[in-house]
Amino acid sequence: MPYRSTEVPATAFAITTVNVPDRLDLRDMDDRKLDEDTRRRFDLTAFRVWAPRLFFIALFAGIAFVLLEVLDTWRTSLSAQQLSQRLTSSIGVPVEIETSRFVFSPIPRLVLTKVSIDHKVVLGEVSIHVGTRHIAQALQGRGWNWGEAIVGPTLLTMEQGNFLIHLLPKLGSALPGSLSALRFERIEIAEQPWLTGSWQVDVSREGGAGFAKVTAMTRSGASWMRFVLTPGEQEQSVHFQMDGQNWRIPFGASFPMEEAIAVGDISPTSLEIHDFSLGGAFGAVKGNVSGKFDGLWSLNGVLEAEGLDLAALVRLLSPAPADQDRSKSETEEVIQGNASFSGKFEGKGATLVEAASATIFAAPVQVRWPVLNGINLGYAATRPGSTAGTGGGSTRFSALSAVVVASNGSVSFRDLRGHAGALAASGQVDMAADHSLTGLLHVELGATRVLAPIRVAVRGTVSKPEFGR
């Protein structure tokens, strides 16, 4: 059949280029789709394994970063050079620090060595403590928050101490506000026999005045003494408040005072103790002291007492042995009664210590209810020919007075005058620094008895007086 057209005639069959997958192809496609779904799905098992590891890695990385930042801060702001410059600028005098290092054992602290202040004072070591709370605050990015600063053992003169006290208020702006306390572990005062021993000194902030309050304390057994020091109103002066217990005065009395209180001001050229009180079993004495330096130190002051127990004073001067009966000891004391006096003292010396040691005190003394033990003067006066002298016993006076002159540990009872009815006694008794007695008493019975006056020698010691002709 001839073709009239070039087109292919349509039939019931069609040829196509689309590939129809067979069963193997379909399975392969399903496997690929499952793999893709598995890859897209979150693997909880792997997360549980790696999440803690990644967390600790991140944490350690953060800590390392902070520590590096902290170390970098320390190398710059806490270096010896930077600290020296900062302190010099703040307190107005040259400060040089030899080294600065951070130490973690036994406790974390910043250690400064050989801190020189104005070439006048050198502090061997200063440790600024950092507690765990302070380290945590630093790691949180709040900066350093310091604890307390501790100065190692130091030897200072009085002049150096005065210099440091007047610098302390300026440290308020020089040191961080978090540094609340400055403590000297152990201070010894050079060339000051009054202030021997080891002192612990604490310096605390006083509001806007910076480090203006210094508390110095020394202790030896039951004895202690404490000073509270602040800069005085006058230039280079220091105001002080002193209190102590069982404190032994460095001159004068040879026994400790149960209580001691004093308030005053001191400078390199002056001393003013406005009020002081020394007390014990004998009672209390009080007074004031004024001192000036003009080539030599000169001291003068007032000392007074009311109702001083002479028996207790004798017991303190010469305490009875531990195995001796107290009642027996009281009957053998050289004198009993209550004394009152008000007198003045003065002294001069090249130093304050020498001036105090050379002080001379003089005062009229009145004694109420006086009793002289060891001799019955009335009995002795009625037997002027007797050579035995004493006969023991005691003499009760209705009145007794004297002028007391004390210096360098010795005491002189001058112009002694005692009355017991018609009996009159006068004379002088001296007590040396070792408590030995020497003296002479003149005793007479007055115009009513025709008897010549007798003389009674006083010897022995305060604890064991001896009377004779």
Image (cartoon, rainbow, N blue to C red):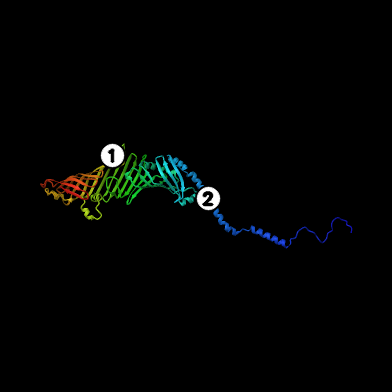
Looking at the rendered image, the quarter that the N terminus falls into is: bottom right
Is 297 displayed left or right of 76 in the figure? left
- Report the mark closest to the observer, 1 or 2: 2
Pick whichever, 398 or 175, lies toward us.
175
Q: Position of residue 167 (x, y in %)?
A: 40, 42
Give the spatial CA distance, label 1 vs label 2. Answer: 68 Å
Helix, strand or loop at mark 1: strand
Q: Secondary structure at mark 2?
A: helix
Identify residue for label 1.
Answer: 348
Q: Is residue 157 left or right of residue 25?
A: left
For disc 2, the neighbor class at 10 Å (few under 14, some 14 to 19, many from 20) is few
Farthest-out residue, bottom = 23
Left or right of 249: which side holds 137? right
The amino acid type, in three-letter code, at marker 1 is Lys
What x and y, as percent, mark residue 241?
34, 46
> Compared to 368, does 23 lie above or below?
below
Q: Earlier in the sequence, mark 1 or mark 2?
A: 2
Q: Disc 2 residue type? A: Ala
Residue in front for this viewpoint, 322 or 268? 322
Relative image position of residue 48 (x, y in whole percent): 57, 58
Q: Residues within 10 Å of mark 1 (few under 14, many from 20)?
A: many
Residue 252 sits in quarter: top left
Residue plotted at (28% across, 39% down): 348
The residue wearing badge 2 is 64
